Image (cartoon, helix red, strand yellow):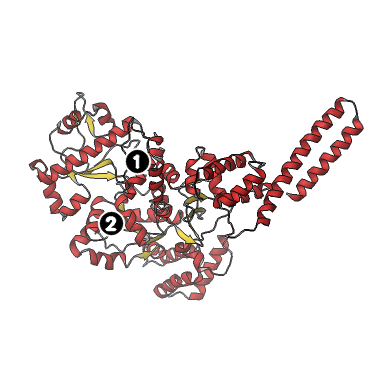
Amino acid sequence: MANQIPEEVIEEVRKSNDIVDVVGEYVQLKKQGRNYFGLCPFHGENTPSFSVTQEKQIFHCFGCGKGGNVVTFIMEMESFSFVEAIKHLASRSGTQLPELGGEKESSLSQDTQNILSAYEWLTKLYHHLLRFTRDGKEGYNYLKSRGISDTAIDEFQLGFAPTAKSFTAEFLKKKGFNQALSVKAGLLSLQNDNSVTDRFRGRVIFPIRNHLGKTIAFGGRSISGGEPKYLNSAESELFHKGKILYNFDLAKKHIRKENEVILFEGYMDVITAYQAGINNVIATLGTALSEYQAKLLNRYVDTVVICYDGDKAGLEATYKAANLLRNVGCQVKIANMQDDLDPDSFIKAHGGKAFKNEVLNTSDTYVSFYMRYLKKDYNLSIEGDRINYIEKVIKELALIDSSVEREYYLQELHKEYNISMESLTQEVEIQRNKQGQQPKKDNPDKNRNTNRGLSYRSNKKLLPAFQNAERKLLSYMLHNPLIAEKVQEEMGAGFNIEAHQIIATHLYAFYEEGHLSDISLFIEKLSDSELQKLVTEIAMYPVLEEISDKEINDYIRIIQEHRNDYVSIQTLKEQQKLAEQQKDPLKAAQIAMQIIEIKKQLKRTN
């Protein structure tokens, strides 16, 4: 199938999708030197070890070893086949692909593809009914009464499912969709008499899209008093409530631009904020924030502003979400929502500008919120409760490394409860010692999540000298065809490591085909994923722009000496075996001593 896309088209797609831009849609990247670093999307980590090289158009994780070019990155991230990855990147860059014959290649099962197609058809149908027909007038009037504009209705593809029992079932049947599959996908409901009805009939429809903008589920809002008020699609292979964030596909670019995301509880909060010009907004889907969602946000952004309802339930949900986000490494702010108000109501009453200035821009830090959150559990007019409250706050403050930040909050306690700074400071130090916090100089960069260190640590053992020489030489060969030509003339594929021999052989062929140095393209031409990873790792080795023939010759010498010594050992072992067969123990012992001496020399040089 991949062969049906001409190589020149594949190369055009690859070159028109800069790897930094593409990876940046999944990972928050920060430049350090010539490379970009971020948290690896393929394994859990708190310190960035994932590197992207714009110059070479490759990525490599020093933690888990994943590596490749822009195409392999998309294949890994989306579980796409090669063709799907090329199609996705072509669509992203506006590159025209030729018509592809044969069966459609997809990493998704046929049933899943059919469910996606059914959701696509119904999204269009429900939206059309709401906007342009009498059947959808009830839903349209409801949304207009909630202050939702036609522009927002169209942008979010809001719709209405008619009240007729079999309307949707008949529509899907005419489109050729299997009824049992539609029931399994949660689009239809099976009744006791084996008849089917629309799961969402009589409800306003909120399409729930994945990060690629494809509808994978519906949220239905009852507008006639039916229960439950909100109804989601059933969970499936495509849809897991704990993994999806509403509006993430539209908000992604705004989140990256602002380096901040605003987290709401509901669809209407998001839509109202979005149409008021606040675009870096997302919401959970009627459930508490999950660890998966928290980790996803941490990959994209430093700061999460939690903006839940101002009532008691909202306060509890905020506390749980804040701690979850902090545990995965996010900096957390808590929007200053007034009691018994939700974001949707506030924006409708006061407008988007007031929401920004009075709610978002006055957000509390986590500690300020925590101090306010704790107060609900205590009657602060009672002396014992006051003391318990202060002690609990001090335990939280003791966890803060920055002495400036600790003092700031201690000053608040000092002013509010008239306790001396000396006593408060002393108590914090006692708590820090109990918690195992060691006194140390403040490091502002370390204490700010916005400046997480962009370093990585390699747990791999140091390589032997010959192996290191082989990798260094291959790295220079990847960057310079003339060096590859010199190595080919002097030692061919005479590397000691088999994988290095294979890489060198492929590289000679690559240059003989007329290609210039292009590491990303070379990786693409390798069919073995393990070889792709190894080439990426080798390509990340630092190389000098100007390297002398002497240095290249030194690498070749080290490699050849090891190979010669290895050959010598093998020859001597054969001679030793022969001496033993000829019952000449003295000669066998002399040969054994020679082998030991060569091995000692090898150890010293390695």
The quadrant holding residue 149 is bottom left
The quarter of the picture where the N terminus appears is top left
Disc number lying in front (1 or 2)? 1
- Amino acid carrying mark 1 in the image: His
| Near-viewer residue (268 or 579) | 579
Please give the residue where the numbered disc 2 appears in the rendered image.
309
Please give the residue where the numbered disc 1 appears in the rendered image.
240
* SS at badge 2: loop
Spatial CA distance of label 1 from label 2 is: 24 Å
| Near-viewer residue (591 or 188) | 591
Q: Residues within 10 Å of mark 1 (few under 14, many from 20)?
A: some
Q: Position of residue 206 (x, y in %)?
A: 23, 45
Q: Residues within 10 Å of mark 2 (few under 14, many from 20)?
A: many
| Near-viewer residue (215 or 508) | 508
Is 26 on the left-hand or right-hand side of 463?
A: left
Is 21 on the left-hand or right-hand side of 401?
A: left
Q: Position of residue 127 (x, y in %)?
A: 17, 44
